[in-house]
Image (cartoon, rainbow, N blue to C red):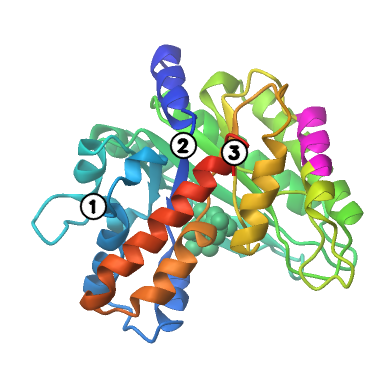
Amino acid sequence: MDKNILVETANKMMMRPKGILAMDESSPTIAKRLASIKVDNNEDNRRRYRELIVTAPNLSDYISGAILFEETFDQKMNDGTLFRDYLASIGILPGIKVDKGAKDLSCHPNEKITEGLDGLRDRLAAYYENGAKFCKWRAVITIANDIPSDACIESNMNALARYASLCQENNLVPIVEPEVLINGTHSIDECDKVTRKSLSSLFSHLKMFNVYLPGTVLKPSMVISGQENDSRASYEEVASKTIACLRDFVPDDTAGIAFLSGGQTDLEAESHLNIMNQSSDLPWRVTFSYARAIQAAALAAWQGKDENLESSQSILIERAQRCSNSSVGKL
Ligand code: 5MM
């Protein structure tokens, strides 16, 4: 592990006023996204859509790094350039999602465990060799009756720590993503409790595995009411409870925080981030690593048609710019 390389990469990822673009939808997820616009889910259409994203004019003004799915990491654009090389050429760090997805947790109905540790060391060495600068692994925590269980939280946080230490051994910055899902009727206080328990467990596992925090980026969900809750908390309450929770569990020397949007509307995702960044004394950089809150409107505008390419790219850039402004509290 070379700490200087890790810190240099992490600092570039957290550069103001930028954030990280998540475009690493796995095969089942990209299938849903393309189905939503009635476009066939084949390799060429996945390439066309992702090429639309990375070639949006001036993307690198707002985006420091892009998380790719492994297919995209090894894929060529229409002119034969590898996506990963193109991103590097425009000043966007290429990263890769390395988990193998959230699978059913044995004997724990409705709970998931993220898989992908077997063989990970060799895969990481190859990704680094091929130009990846950082990686991502997502753990999923569901709030419902009697869940999450300790088994779900502990096993997922242990896997995140094992993944993070393997990344750092290969000079790749790990993005650790413990997502407490927004789905459900739970209150913001229930979300707060579960997020606290998850972050407490995560940072104790990271410590146990000697993960170097200045070379680690946290990608958390916000502390927020469930999507089906009848009286959802205000933007101000989400922002203040999220920051209070992070202050209690995230050590100051962590490289930075880049939120997922998790099904929030575009307006919610940008407003929450903007309010959080209006406090001047945060110990870490707090930015975004959104997928849907940057891509959704552009995807809907594209509809798989070349004639919609430019208008779709303008929408994508507007979303990226608004998220960038929020990441410095200037929306
Ligand atoms: C883009 O989606 C990522 C991969 O998820 P799947 O394995 O389910 O396909 C996901 O980890 C994403 O990076 C984050 O959730 C951020 O995306 P949102 O849409 O929540 O901002």
Label 3 residue SS: loop
Tell me which corner region of the image, top left, top right, bottom left or bottom right, holds residue 228: bottom right
Q: Is residue 262 left or right of residue 5?
A: right
Label 1 residue SS: loop
Taking the spot 73% from the left edge, 29% from the top edge, the residue there is 279
Q: Which residue is mark 2?
A: 18
- In magenta, the rendered stretch is 240-249
User: What is the spatial separation of the Cα atoms under label 2 and label 3, in whole angstroms?
Assistant: 12 Å
Taking the spot 20% from the left edge, 42% from the top edge, the residue there is 85
Q: Nearer the viewer, mark 2 or mark 3?
A: 3
User: What is the spatial separation of the Cα atoms under label 2 and label 1, in whole angstroms?
Assistant: 25 Å
Query: Can you say which quadrant of the picture contains the C terminus?
Result: top right
Taking the spot 47% from the left edge, 69% from the top edge, the residue there is 297
Q: Inspect this view and state whether residue 282 appears.
A: yes
Taking the spot 25% from the left edge, 71% from the top edge, the residue there is 43
The three-letter amino acid code for the residue at tag 1 is Asp
Residue lying farthest to the bottom in this orientation: 38
Q: Which residue is mark 3?
A: 330
Earlier in the chain: of badge 2 and badge 3, it is 2
Q: Inspect this view and state whether residue 289 appears.
A: no
The three-letter amino acid code for the residue at tag 3 is Lys
* Neighbour tally class for label 3: few under 14, some 14-19, many 20 plus, Cα within 10 Å: some
Q: Position of residue 258 (x, y in %)?
A: 58, 40
Residue 74: mark: 1
